[in-house]
Amino acid sequence: MSLVVLLAQADPSRVGAGRIQGGWEFVTAAYVLTLLGIVLYAASLWVRRRKE
Amino acid sequence: MTLLADSPATRRPPGLLAATLVVLRKDLLIEWRTRARLNALLFFAISTLLLFSFALGAKSAVLKAHAGGYFWLAIIFASILSLSESFRIEGENAALEGLKLAAIDARAVFIGKALGNTVLLWGLGIILAPLSIAVFDLNVMLGLWRLVGIIGIGSMAISAAGTFYSAIASNARARDVLLPILLFPVLVPVIISSVGATSLIFEGDPMGQMSSWVGMLGVLNVIYWALGLVLFPRITEDI
Amino acid sequence: MPSWLANALLILPAGLLIAICFKRDLIEIGWKVMAVQAAIMLPVGAWLGLSWAPPEREMGDVYRIIYAHVPQVWMALLGVTLNFGCSVAYLMKKSWTADALAEASAEVGLYFGIVGVTLGAIWGKPTWGVYWTWDPRLTSAAVMLIYYTGYLAMRRFTENPDTRATWSAALGTFGIVIPVTVYFSVVWMKSLHQVQSTPKTVDPQMVFALRWAACAFLCLLIVFVYQRYKVARAALAREVAPPEALGPAPVPKGLTT
């Protein structure tokens, strides 16, 4: 653990930031898929319902 | 119509064990007389094994490493044939209705049929084993009796679940599609455990893992047979 | 955002579910309340997940998928559990309510399951490097999806309503066994899910956002299951309907048997 800290102080470019950078396209895809799913399923329920 | 003391109307229906044996004997007798199912099973399973070999580029090292998997896949695919057939014959000549009219306990039908399927699959596995050992160049490190035993309890698990689901599938439309969809999810743990145990038999068991797999197979058998016994009468009462 | 708010809002769906056990007609008003609550909480939840919650220490912003993935997987599990309950209930006492509710919960559970697993794969790519792996949880999930697809297929292929209901009940009862056995059998093999995907921090903002999202999806689940239940009851009524000359088939309001 301390070796990494020493290395980070000496030469930051050789040590990663410790997190995954970006990746917003995955997040967007996930949220859009959720919304799309809800809309499509609700629509399918609407189409399938029968009036009394 | 007078009821005589010994007429069919007053005779008690056979007990569970006797009824089971009747059903088992009937199924095995039908099978023995035509041998159609066993032949089909054999040729299908052997073809599957050979197809796997060619599909994987006939590289002996690869095949040897995963032989347990191919062996059980061949049995599982063949079991679908066997299970569909086991209920199709009941459809002919209203045989299933005949069983119900004879006041045979539905649980006896389940146990009898499932045992019949077990015998067939076990037989298939026993014939397939020396073939696989030859084709995949395997060593039986843990003894032939253990192999026979594993094939046995694996076949029992497949048959119990398979008999239950094929009773449903064979009476619905698109039965050939429905049985695999329903059965394969249930067979996943059986495949995992059987292949695990079989691979240990062929490769040796330095870490003593065999008992875990056998235990898992035992639990699966208890669950499938118990659930089948409880639920089978309900699903056949309306057919 | 006051920290008790997510828990407080949970009282509404939970309260409705308990109240229905005593007075079934409440669902007629109840589902509309749930629809409104979901319509409000879902967009707010999206905002909470996308910008209000802080970035994660190791996964950065990609982790935000959990606010959509985890609640929907929970809803899938709820749907499947409800299906199990209805299946057992039907076996003990035949009722069209139990059968229609079983069909509804299986379909809605399958819907949330498919979306949940897909979202999980989308999460897996940037974090684990792969869309899929055969660890216990994922294998159990995939197997469950196939099984309940088969359940719905069997229902579609069976024409007699009584037979269909009995067979569905049998399948639904058997179905509870599957994830348990699959899970334990794969555990013998290997495990990946637990170690790498759960955020190690218990930042209260993250807990809040997750609880908010779970509440929102629970309201949505209630709406979907009830509407799907009505579709199932209407279809049943048409199936067992008397000839047209006797008038249109009545569709019962609410959850009356």
Image (tube, coloured by chain):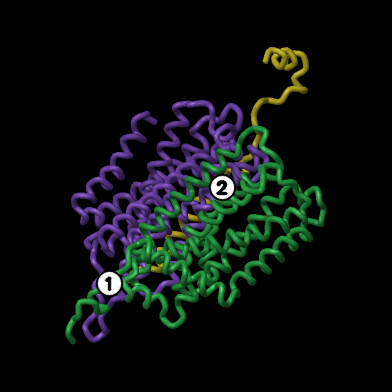
Which lettered chain is shown in green? B
Residue situated in front as seen by the camera: C179 or B136: B136
Q: Quadrant of residue C246?
A: bottom left
**Residue that mark 2 sits on:** C139
Give the percent coordinates (x, y) of residue B36: 60, 75
Mark yes or no: residue B205 visible.
yes
Q: Chain of mark 2?
A: C
Question: Alpha-carbon neighbours of circle 2 within 10 Å: few (<14), some, or many (≥20)?
Answer: some
Screen quadrant of the C terminus of chain C = bottom left
Which lettered chain is shown in yellow? A
Amino acid type shown at disc 2: Thr
Amino acid type shown at disc 1: Glu
Residue C250 to residue B93: above or below: above
Residue at x 52% of width, y 75% of height: B30
Label 2 secondary element: helix
Residue C96 to residue C35: above or below: below
Residue at x 50% of width, y 61% of height: B162
Lateral position of residue B113 relative to residue B235, left or right: right
Which lettered chain is shown in purple? C
Give the percent coordinates (x, y) of residue C123: 59, 42
Give the percent coordinates (x, y) of residue C66: 52, 39
Give the percent coordinates (x, y) of residue C229: 33, 61
Residue situated in front as seen by the camera: C217 or B226: B226
Q: Do tag 1 and tag 2 residues touch (Cβ < 8 Å)?
A: no
Marker disc for residue A52: 1
